[in-house]
Image: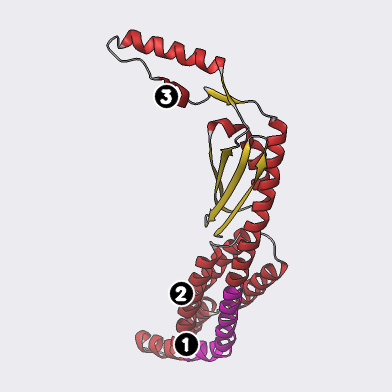
Amino acid sequence: MTGYAQASAGSPRGTLSLELRSVNARFLDVQFRIADELRALEPVLREQLVARIARGKVDCRVSLAEGDGVTPRLNEEALRRLRAVAEAARRAFPDAAPPSLAEVLRWPGVLATETDADALRSVAAALCRRALDELSATRTREGAKLAAGIVERVREMRAQVEKVMPLVPEAVAAYQHKITERLREALGSADDERVRTEIALFASKADVAEELDRLRAHLSEVERVLGAGGAVGKRLDFLAQELNREANTLASKAASAAVADCALELKLLIEQIREQVQNLE
């Protein structure tokens, strides 16, 4: 489901801000956009996100506005590595100009700030919890609207099934009579045994009572899953596939236009449900 949340708070190094954006996805995909000097915060943030979100593409952005009282220092180890790289590059390209002071200071890791790493992680964890609460509330509101739409389509499908069930015996009987007359004309004689064999074969293929019963059962399960709440997306995705399977079988075995129309309407409603299910966690 889609959602957005943002939170910020003071930290030993300045104002720390965290932003969460989520869009629909079949599985969970968490992407981080964090400055290199804050990369140590990623594990604690990822742990919280994975624990609270089961589905969707989540973009987590973390930024830091340094406070006025924070004085950066030169990272001697980073400078040593940069110097070694620069000397190797100068040997390969002797005519190249040396890096400027501004370029050196912009090199990742050259400027470091004395800070309490544990305190910074604690602030980041608290920010993530606040943002997740807001994101979850947004996704819950959207999920409730989507669930209501799915329930409405389930009701329409159940009405279609209930409407067509009384028509099935009559449609099968009419079609059997039609097949009987055609068989007798084709055989040129009243070969009742052959006719009965063919009709029995047809009856076994045209009987859709089992498909209608399974459709009813699947629709009841959809309602139960939605009523139970929680992470329902994957379960409903599976049920939508099963509903579509039964609707396809119903269409292939339709003995009348009414049954065929019912199967087509069911397939349209199921496709609408499948589109909505992809947005649910």
Q: Residues within 10 Å of mark 2 (few under 14, many from 20)?
A: some
Residue hosting label 1: 258
> Can residue 213 be seen at all in this image of the molecule?
yes
Q: Position of residue 166 (x, y in %)?
A: 58, 90
Q: Nearer the viewer, residue 256 or 98?
A: 98
**Residue sitting at x 59%, y 67%:** 142
Q: Decide: marks 3, 2 in contact (CB < 8 A)? A: no
User: Closer to the camera: disc 2 or disc 1?
Assistant: 1
Kindly report the distance in space between the C-alpha atoms of the residues bearing marks 3 and 1.
78 Å
**Residue sitting at x 70%, y 65%:** 229
Quarter of the image containing the N terminus? bottom right
Q: Nearer the viewer, residue 275 or 108?
A: 108
Q: Amino acid at mark 1?
A: Ala
**Residue sitting at x 60%, y 86%:** 162
Q: Residues within 10 Å of mark 1 (few under 14, many from 20)?
A: some
Residue hosting label 2: 252
Kindly report the distance in space between the C-alpha atoms of the residues bearing marks 3 and 2.
73 Å
What secondary structure is found at the residue carrying circle 3? helix
Give above or below for 35 relative to 110. Answer: below
Q: Position of residue 167 (x, y in %)?
A: 54, 90
The stretch in magenta equals 148-174
Residue hosting label 3: 102
User: Who comes first in sequence, dot 3 or dot 1?
Assistant: 3
Kindly report the distance in space between the C-alpha atoms of the residues bearing marks 2 and 1.
13 Å
Magenta-highlighted stretch: main secondary structure? helix
What secondary structure is found at the residue carrying circle 1? helix
Question: In the shown orientation, is residue 78 left or right of residue 50?
Answer: left
Q: Amino acid at mark 2?
A: Ser
Q: Position of residue 5 (x, y in %)?
A: 59, 55
Question: In the shown orientation, is residue 277 left or right of residue 194?
Answer: right
Q: Amino acid at mark 3?
A: Ala
